[in-house]
Amino acid sequence: MEDTDRKISGSARRNRYFRFKQMRTEEFEIEQDYLIGRRRLINRSVLGWGVVWGYELDQAKPDGHASGEARPVRVSHGLALDAAGREVESRASVELGPHNTFLREWHANGYKSKPWDECEPGTYLLCVHYAEEPVSDAPIGDRCGCEPPQKRFVCETAVFSLNRLTNEKERCAERGCERQCQCAGKDLCSEPGRRSHHCLCEWATHESPERACPLISWSDYDVALADCVCLAVVVVAQTSDPCAPVTIECIEDACGPRRIVKSNDVLYDLIRGCDLTHIIDVSWKDWHRRMHPAVPWNAFAKRFRPRPGTNDPEGSTQFTVKFSRPVRVDTLRIDAIIMTAAIVEQPTGWLAVRRIPIERLDPVPAVTDKGTPPLETRELRIVVTPRWLHNEIRSDEDSWFTERDFMIEIQIRGDLILDCNFQPVDGDAIGLVGLPSGNGTPGGTFRSSFMVGAKSLAPDSGTA
């Protein structure tokens, strides 16, 4: 019978039990390697790799620390999966230092570890590594007593490394869509519902998860030196303290370099658009999709008056929009919101549409506490041109709004409004309620329409 021991290695081999089989150390090692190896295979093939949760960084504030004095950095407990599928777990908050952090450098034969104190000033990637620490001595009962004691257990833990930042792209762990696929050509299974099957097939066929590299001894640990999960970009500086000549001066970015493992809950939240900004309120929400009865003219015209007791500029209205998260003011341009009025022409019923001239979109509040325009805002106010406002709304003379009812449609283009994370606002209006907006995808247009009664030429009573 062919010897299969040379053909089967690693986690593919497991014990076969039979009567009178003797279990030696080798057999127990095979069983453990099989269970661990299969679990890590599933981790790296199905779950992916990156930070699962935790590993929050915190640094002591400059208050109470002299210039050039080391300010400790602490890393909270957390869990990560490295590219080989190892679970990198830190069970407690730790302070970074020479005892648990080393300098990692690439050489011709692979990665090498160097002491923390050899770090030169500059920008580094802070990464976490899987590590094993043998613990609890077990004396060996040999005849002469010459054998050193063995360790009873292995404690799985985490250690950290500093890696010189040489490529600015390393600051961003998760970039845009990097997967590509070729055209399907002749596809016997081509149907509209299978539009992405060819790409999925190509990706799965060419996928090859990284295999585990051997552990390397460092200090009292055996470390997965070649595999790591990046946590942050930090700045390393030298200090005047001879006992601590190297310190992490500041944490520059504790988010961008992190690759994230998406759990099922996170994936469902992403599908629902929980990470996106939504429109949570509009000042005319009670009129949204109201066709009958029409909104009274006086109530509609009142929305174009300045708010009582304010110094609102000429043309400022009471048509406002609120967002669930701050949006960038520089994206609030007049093409982001469209207001149109549609009047039914006689006798055929054609809708004659005209666009209400919007002069600008003002953030609310218009200035910050420092007296400067804000860069971000949670609310905007529509400002129309004063001339249009005077002729069409405030004047007692005939205007385009007299004689018959008309429809107002307001469109908020979420594709053109970016939030504080540079993502388009999820703006689609859903059903009759419409708020909060969103269908789970970035962008989309919030459409809101309502009927308004014809303009009255009688003196404005000011009632709604």
Image: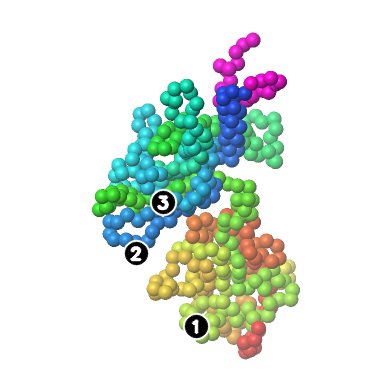
Relative to 138, say whether 325 is above or below: below
Question: Which mark's residue is nearer the viewer, 1 or 3?
Answer: 3
Q: Which mark is residue 29?
A: none
Q: Which part of the image, by quadrant, shows the N terminus?
A: top right
**Residue 149 appears at what percent x and percent y?**
46, 30
Q: Earlier in the sequence, mark 3 or mark 2?
A: 2
In front of the other: 92 or 268: 92
Q: Secondary structure at mark 2?
A: loop
Mark 2 or mark 1, earlier in chain: 2
Query: Foreground residue, 142 or 37?
Result: 142
Which residue lies under the disc numbered 1?
310
Quarter placement of the C terminus: bottom right
Label 2 crowding class (10 Å Cα cut-off): few <14, some 14-19, many 20+?
few
Q: Residues in magenta?
A: 1-22
Let me know if residue 95 appears in the view: yes
Residue annotated with mark 3: 95
Question: Residue drawn 51% across and 77% down?
Answer: 316
**Which residue lies at the image location 45% right of the left edge and 63% below the top edge?**
330
Q: Quadrant of residue 29?
A: top right
